[in-house]
Image: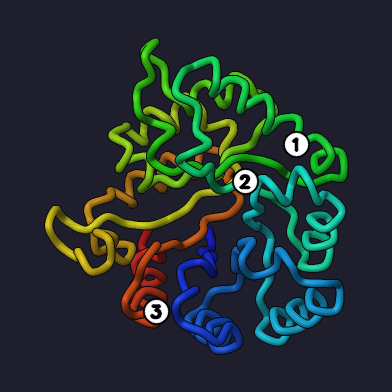
């Protein structure tokens, strides 16, 4: 049976973390996904404490988001984090707007940069890849998309496919799954509210309570190498509602 993990970024506005870990564990989650704001600056003792909290709640952290600066400039710290917390798949999650290329050549070069950054982690036995938002699917002047160019420049990159962002980018997720499914090693599972609804949650919805066709998507995604399915909501108002309703819906897929 496919299991659903929980991206801890979804709970960043609901401290303390110790309560969040207890909450998600109580709703049947056994995996969580970390992000740089949680562990990027922790020393070894801090990381060991974090690991102990995960263990106490019978949670594992197989995947994690790592900022590009940390990956490129502090590889020893990144490897310490991954090793201590038990992370096996490292994903670079974002590129700030003011750093984004404007043409195909620039995005191809960015793919090359990611590929180069990932070598040391892949050589150490980790899965390494890119997590998308919506901007990667906006057409470039030559007709291609940034996401195509990233994968062309970085042919060895894995992909954590954030399906709802693909949809928000105006692309067809089924087409992308068909074309690049072999690259997908993890999936962000989140939902989009009907137009005009949930404006106080940036238009996102609990999984199964929005417009993303998750039942059909899961059928397609189960044919890919994806090992981890991770619940995310970028701005939930009620973290327990999110955790409980999303898990209940996911079990039907």
Q: Residue furthest top?
A: 142
Q: Is residue 102 left or right of residue 153?
A: left
Front-lying residue, 124 or 219: 124
Q: At which x and y percent is residue 142?
A: 39, 10
Dot label at residue 117: 1
- What residue would you read off at disc 3? 239
**What residue is rendered at 34% in x and 71% in y?**
236
Between marks 3 and 2, how big is the CA–CA gap? Answer: 25 Å
Dot label at residue 80: none
Q: Are marks 2 and 1 in contact (CB under 8 Å)?
A: yes
**What residue is rendered at 38% in x and 40% in y?**
134
Between marks 1 and 3, how big is the CA–CA gap? Answer: 34 Å
Q: Are marks 3 and 2 in contact (CB under 8 Å)?
A: no
Q: Is residue 8 left or right of residue 69?
A: left
Between marks 2 and 1, how big is the CA–CA gap? Answer: 10 Å
Q: Secondary structure at mark 3?
A: helix
Q: At which x and y percent is residue 47?
A: 79, 74
Quarter-wise, where is residue 235 in the image? Answer: bottom left
Q: Is residue 198 above or below residue 245?
A: above
**What residue is rendered at 65% in x and 84% in y?**
57
Q: Reading the chain from its start, which is encountered first: label 1 or label 3?
A: 1
Q: Quadrant of the C terminus?
A: bottom left
Q: Residues within 10 Å of mark 3 (few under 14, many from 20)?
A: some
């Amino acid at each position: 049976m496919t299991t659903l993990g929980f991206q801890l970024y979804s709970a960043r506005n609901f401290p303390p973390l110790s309560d969040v870990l207890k909450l998600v564990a109580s709703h049947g989650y056994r995996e969580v996904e970390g992000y740089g704001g949680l562990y990027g600056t922790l020393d070894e003792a801090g990381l060991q404490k974090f690991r102990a909290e995960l263990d106490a709640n019978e949670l594992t952290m197989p995947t994690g988001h790592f900022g590009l600066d940390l990956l490129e400039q502090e590889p020893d710290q990144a490897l310490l984090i991954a090793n201590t917390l038990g992370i096996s798949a490292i994903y670079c999650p974002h590129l700030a707007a003011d750093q984004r290329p404007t043409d195909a050549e620039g995005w191809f070069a960015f793919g090359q940069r990611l590929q180069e950054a990932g070598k040391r982690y892949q050589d150490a036995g980790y899965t390494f890849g890119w997590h998308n938002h919506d901007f990667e699917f906006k057409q470039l002047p030559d007709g291609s998309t940034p996401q195509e160019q990233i994968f062309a420049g970085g042919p060895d990159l894995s992909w954590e496919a954030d399906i709802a962002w693909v949809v928000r980018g105006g692309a067809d997720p089924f087409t992308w799954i068909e074309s690049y499914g072999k690259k997908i090693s993890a999936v962000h599972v989140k939902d989009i509210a009907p137009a005009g609804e949930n404006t106080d949650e940036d238009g996102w919805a609990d999984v199964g309570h929005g417009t993303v066709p998750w039942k059909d998507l899961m059928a397609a995604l189960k044919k890919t190498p994806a090992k981890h399915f991770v619940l995310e909501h970028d701005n939930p108002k009620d973290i327990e509602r999110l955790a409980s309703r999303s898990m209940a819906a996911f079990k039907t897929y």
